[in-house]
Image (cartoon, rainbow, N blue to C red):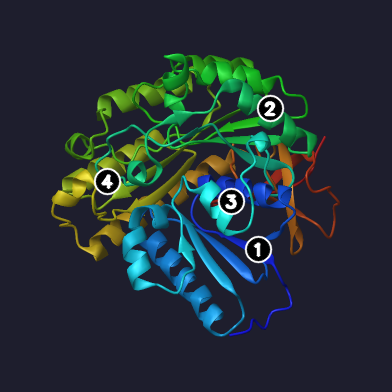
């Protein structure tokens, strides 16, 4: 059927899932632009590339529904071609080809050259680190490694992303310089496991050296760490964080659980005692550090006693930032052989209890900020507010600082000193300060 859209030979890249997928889409778009292709991100186009997520049940469902929606648009003549790439496609390609055959082609996470070929483009090796960013102009993700060597029982990422592979320091510095030249001021370092960085290339954990090198890039003012693993954490990173003002006093360290039997079954390689000691060392080394973590409730065999241990520990540790997910039973993971024995309503209730507790902790911590001047980066204007973040907050997942746009003017993308006047559970309100 002839397509009804007037956007001829315009490639629409649709991104689902995590920041790693955002990065991969940006690389794809950079390659397409270098091949003189018209490419847009989540806008109208007659050719669609869906970068999927296959991590947990909800994400897989969203990816499948998005594929079906664009296949329907293809049947209606609103788009001409639909291509699927990313984690879901890597993990379930044969099943998807069988169940949704109207997709023009499926590609895995390492199939970029073949995907480009299907789109009439050549893979350009000289474009190392160059990409078309889709985030607000002031920040960008910097993926420092791909894949994961950890044996966590619940996680399918190694199936979709392969073994850990670090990107050399000099390549990352070059990429950071390119981003800074475009006006990026904040780098958000991402990987499946930041703390493993460098072991494959340099035979040692080399995150601290990478941070020192990136801190020298002119124009970059904030460097933020996401997705650290608690086992084997390189403690020299804390020294760099304390001494280098560009490194945000912030770390995202997904801990998943704290009850020893659950940690053992999860194959996390640590204990409650070791994890608590590590976090206390974080606080001692960098006293005003904001620690973000994520937890899983409803893992197979999680008893009410295990959950109460977790809940009490959250109350004790007072994390600045915390997210909680219900366990998703994923085929081909080690935990899939276990019985998924916690009822869905119990999983949800436990997640709700953790988040209610965290909301109270966050409210109490936020009250302490009232009257303080905080350096914020202004991400956007939304409705009647300018929306900013402190160094203790990452985009999309953490607190935001709201400034009344009817009374004050701030430039999006700039830093500003904001005096905090009010505080809610997860939002701060302020006015331009000194």
Name the residue carrying label 2: 174
The Cα–Cα distance between marks 3 and 1, rounded to whole angstroms, is: 12 Å
Name the residue carrying label 1: 11
Q: Is residue 351 above or below residue 415?
A: below
Mark in the foreground, 1 or 4: 1
Element under label 3? helix
Image coordinates of residue 150 in percent, x first then y, are: 32, 33
Kindly identify the residue that appears in the image at 28 percent across and 42 percent down: 310
> Contact (CB < 8 A) between labels 1 and 4?
no
Element under label 1? strand
Mark in the foreground, 3 or 1: 1
- Depth check: give the residue in front, 248 or 102: 102
Q: Quadrant of the C terminus?
A: top right
Q: Quadrant of the N terminus?
A: bottom right
Name the residue carrying label 4: 154
Q: Please tell me how crowded label 4 is: few (under 14), some (14-19), or many (20+) other residues with Cα within 10 Å.
A: many
Relative to 226, 372 lies left or right: right
Q: Is residue 415 above or below residue 204?
A: below
Name the residue carrying label 3: 25
């Amino acid at each position: 059927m002839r397509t009804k859209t007037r956007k001829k030979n315009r490639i629409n890249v649709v991104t689902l899932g995590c920041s790693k997928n955002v990065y991969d889409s940006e690389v794809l778009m950079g390659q397409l632009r270098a091949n003189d292709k018209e490419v847009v991100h989540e806008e109208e186009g007659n050719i669609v590339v869906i970068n999927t997520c296959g991590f947990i049940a909800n994400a897989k469902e969203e990816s499948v529904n998005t594929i079906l929606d664009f296949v329907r648009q293809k049947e209606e003549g609103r788009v001409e071609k639909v291509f699927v790439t990313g984690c879901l496609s890597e993990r379930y390609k044969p099943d998807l080809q069988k169940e949704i055959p109207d997709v023009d082609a499926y590609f895995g996470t390492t199939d970029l050259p073949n995907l480009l070929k299907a789109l009439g483009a050549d893979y350009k090796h000289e474009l190392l680190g160059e990409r078309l960013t889709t985030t607000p102009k002031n920040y960008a993700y910097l993926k420092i490694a791909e894949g994961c060597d950890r044996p966590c029982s619940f996680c399918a990422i190694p199936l979709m992303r392969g073994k850990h592979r670090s990107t050399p320091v000099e390549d990352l510095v070059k990429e950071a310089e390119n981003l800074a030249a475009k006006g990026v001021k904040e780098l958000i370092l991402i990987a499946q496991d930041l703390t493993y960085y460098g072991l494959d290339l340099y035979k040692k954990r080399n995150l601290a050296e990478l941070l020192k090198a990136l801190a020298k890039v002119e124009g970059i003012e904030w460097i933020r760490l996401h997705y650290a693993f608690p086992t084997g954490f390189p403690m020299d990173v804390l020294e760099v964080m304390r001494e280098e003002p560009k490194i945000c006093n912030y770390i995202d360290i997904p801990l998943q659980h704290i009850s020893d039997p659950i940690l053992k079954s999860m194959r996390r390689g640590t204990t409650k005692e070791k994890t608590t000691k590590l976090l206390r060392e974080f606080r001692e080394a960098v006293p005003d550090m904001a620690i973000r973590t994520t937890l899983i409730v409803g893992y197979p065999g999680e008893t009410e006693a295990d959950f109460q241990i977790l809940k009490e520990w959250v109350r004790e540790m007072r994390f600045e930032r915390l997210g909680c997910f219900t366990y998703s039973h994923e085929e081909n993971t080690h935990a899939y052989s276990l019985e998924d024995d916690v009822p869905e309503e119990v999983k949800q209730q436990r997640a709700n209890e953790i988040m209610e507790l965290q909301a109270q902790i966050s409210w109490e911590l936020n009250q302490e900020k009232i009257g303080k001047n905080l350096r914020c980066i202004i991400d956007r204007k939304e409705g009647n507010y300018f929306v900013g973040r402190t160094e203790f907050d990452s985009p999309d997942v953490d607190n935001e600082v709201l400034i009344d746009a009817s009374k004050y003017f701030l430039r999006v993308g700039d830093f500003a000193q904001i005096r905090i006047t009010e505080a809610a559970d997860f939002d701060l309100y302020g006015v331009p300060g000194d």
